[in-house]
Amino acid sequence: MESFPSFLRLHCLWFIFFGFQVRRLGAWSKRQDGPKDRVWFFLLMLAIVGFGFGSFVQPLWDTGIECQVAGQSLVSCVLSPM
């Protein structure tokens, strides 16, 4: 189950970097100026949002692991009030 978040993380990074490179290549082929995006700003903001979302989801993830080890229904155990 831990490989799924890694899968999403890698695809997001691929999309960010590959998408930027495709736009740069397109501008180069048309002899125009390259993209002027503030990529580092977007990466920083994405990291901050990811940290906030991860902080919110981490307790649910830990509860889900405990439920799985105990052999309980994952959905009902995680979504039940604590």
Image: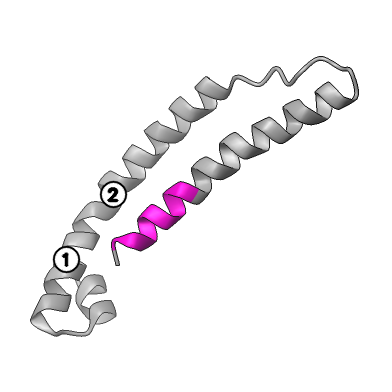
Q: Is residue 35 left or right of residue 77?
A: right
Q: Mark 2 or mark 1, which has the lower sequence index?
A: 2
> In the image, residue 22 lies at what x, y percent?
72, 35
Of residue 43 and residue 58, the one placed in the foreground of this image is 43
- In which image quadrant can residue 1 be found? bottom left
- Can you say whether 30 is above or below 17 in the image? above
> In the image, residue 10 lies at what x, y percent?
46, 48
The residue lying at 17 percent from left, 77 percent from top is: 68
Check disc 1: other Cα within 10 Å, few if <14, some if 14-19, many if 20+: some
The residue lying at 66 percent from left, 38 percent from top is: 19
The circle drawn on residue 56 is: 2
From mark 2 to mark 1, how far is it between C-alphas?
12 Å
- Can you say whether 13 is above or below 45 in the image? below
The residue lying at 26 percent from left, 72 percent from top is: 79
Q: Quadrant of the C terminus?
A: bottom left
Instruction: Find the magenta span and give its range.
Output: 2-10
> In the image, residue 12 lies at what x, y percent?
51, 46
Of residue 82 and residue 48, the one placed in the foreground of this image is 48
Q: Secondary structure at mark 2?
A: helix
Kind of residue at badge 1: Thr
Q: Secondary structure at mark 1?
A: helix
For mark 1, what is the residue?
63
Check disc 2: other Cα within 10 Å, few if <14, some if 14-19, many if 20+: few
Kind of residue at badge 2: Phe
Is residue 9 magenta-colored?
A: yes
